Amino acid sequence: MNAPSAEDALDQALQQARLAHAAADMVRRDAALADAATWGRVLAVALMAPPAATLSWREPAQRFELSEMRASPAALLPTLAAALLAGDRHALRALLMPGVFAAAQASGQGLAHAPCWTHLGNLLGHAILGGRQTQDARESCDRAIAETARTALDPDAGNELLRPLAALLEALSRQDAAAVPALLLDAFERHRAFYAEPARSGLTLGMAAWELSACAALAQQRFAIDLAPLRRFPALCEHVAPAPRVTLSLSLPTRTVPDARQAAWQADVDGIPRLTRQRHTTASGVQITATGSFGIDEWQAEFSLDASAPSLPVDTLLAASDLLARQLDDTPPDDPQERAWHALLLAEALATLDAALIAPASQSLDRERLLARRAAYVGLLALHAGVPEVDARQQALAMADAIKAQVQPLLEALASNPGGTLLQTLRPRPGDAALAFTPTHAAAFAEAAERMWTAGPRLAAATPGSRVVCHVAPAGMLAEDNELSRHFPGGYRTLASELQPQRVWVAWKVIAAGARDGMAYDGLVWLDDHWAWFPKPFRWLKT
């Protein structure tokens, strides 16, 4: 089903609800409102879900691609009201996702995509959720209404329909029980007067009607306001039958990632909830399923695992880190299980941020800002773990794990094709020695590296079934024996004082199938935006 037919179906459902209400056919009206809520739910999901996703309904059986679906905020505004009237909490959850109205506004042009509908949609969302909306937001909404009325809308509609609605929504957001009854009565009275004009007769449920009825329903639920004074207005819609349950399932196309952890990070960006997530092993990789969240009942994503596949883009890693961290409060929860869950999310947020910081494309990042964010995550993790601080050793171990995940695919590709172009990308560039080593001997190390690379580094091809085992250590931990340094040759103990302390070094082995040990390599170092290989640099120190 393409995008126009989806929004047309929504418009048709709202129109059928208007006609049925005018004819006092409440059964047909309620069914049409339920249909409108479901279509609104579908369109909201389409606006926020990954473009390649497919959405399906179980009953009745329908399946459609989301890549081309669009919706206007002018259409979603009455649909949000219809979902509230019909009591469709799944549709409400989808339509109240942050950014839905802004995405709808950005998806097209013209009156239906004017900013005033987005402002009103956000105000209605705050009223439904009970948030305390500020006066500034109301004033911004009024300015947007005035601008739209000046350029594309009947000015009387702005003044007599939309501005009274905005005032009412603001009062509901502020939980102002004293102001709401008078504002409700005024808004309905203005609505009736507006459509009493001869040119507008017959439009009992014209612009803003469903929204006003939604406000009346909220006022009655929240403040026990008597709606009797409003029943003289034909636009009032009440006693709507609950919408039937519709199960929406969202599936994502198979994507290839290096490992299962990166599959989990991609699933975070896709919006698949972690709390209900399950991982299943498949012939080619993993399948991630989940239930609930964002108006979707069932999620399914397939991932093919290939160690030689490129890592997730830096933007995706940063988005995953931000999404994980935003689920948490600054203060750890009291419940031990909830605290442990928050600590797990923080650890994942930290791991994704570390992966972004060491990615080849990280040179374009604002590293100072990201390192400050990382320090904040480390502090929060310490609070959630119940310890006063996370020491340097713990931070080094966390960074080592992140770098291992990043460099493993590179080492495996290097082992499978040691004579390929990948090897040449590791040749130190001019100035790299000064980045890796202290100034005392940096020039000597640069000369030694140039001689070694001119002759060609010795790198044996891996036999079929071989595995690569890598170890990572910050330069500052190579001076003494510890769980990271002991996997490096002993010569690094002497060399450590000549290394730039902030650099991270890699040692690895290529182990043939069935063997316990294998060919050992070392000297790979991360230099801000690229890897450089200085094989066995401790030997150069002796010369």
Image: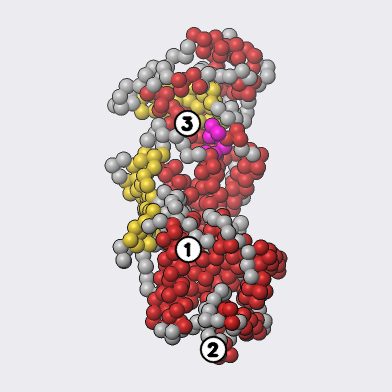
Q: Is residue 147 magenta?
A: no
Where is 379 relative to 331, above or below? Answer: above
Please rate how many residues cluster around mark 1, counting C-alpha atoms within 10 Å: few if below 14, some from 14 to 19, many from 20: many
Dominant secondary structure, magenta: helix
Say which mark, if any, is on residue 94: 1
The way the protein has been coloured in the rendering is secondary structure
Residue lying farthest front? 199
* Relative image position of residue 136 (x, y in whole percent): 71, 65
Q: Nearer the viewer, residue 501 or 482?
A: 501
Q: In the drawing, does residue 474 fall left or right of residue 36?
A: right
Where is 219 relative to 36, above or below? Answer: below
As helix, strand or loop, the secondary structure at mark 1 comes to helix
Say which mark, if any, is on residue 407: 3
Span of residues in magenta: 355-361
Verify CB contact (< 8 Å) between mark 1 and mark 3.
Answer: no
Q: Which residue is identified by label 2? A: 231
Distance from the alpha carbon under mark 1 to that under mark 3: 39 Å
Distance from the alpha carbon under mark 3 to that under mark 2: 69 Å
Tell me the quadrant of the picture where the N terminus can be found.
Answer: bottom left
* Relative image position of residue 531 (x, y in whole percent): 53, 26
- Which amino acid type corresponds to the residue marked 2 in the rendered image? Arg
- Which amino acid type corresponds to the residue marked 3 in the rendered image? Val
Q: Residue at x 49, y 69 (%)?
A: 79
Q: Nearer the viewer, residue 461 or 513?
A: 461
As helix, strand or loop, the secondary structure at mark 2 comes to loop
Tell me the quadrant of the picture where the C terminus can be found.
Answer: top right
- Which amino acid type corresponds to the residue marked 1 in the rendered image? Ala
Looking at the image, tell me whether mark 1 or mark 2 is earlier in sequence order.
1
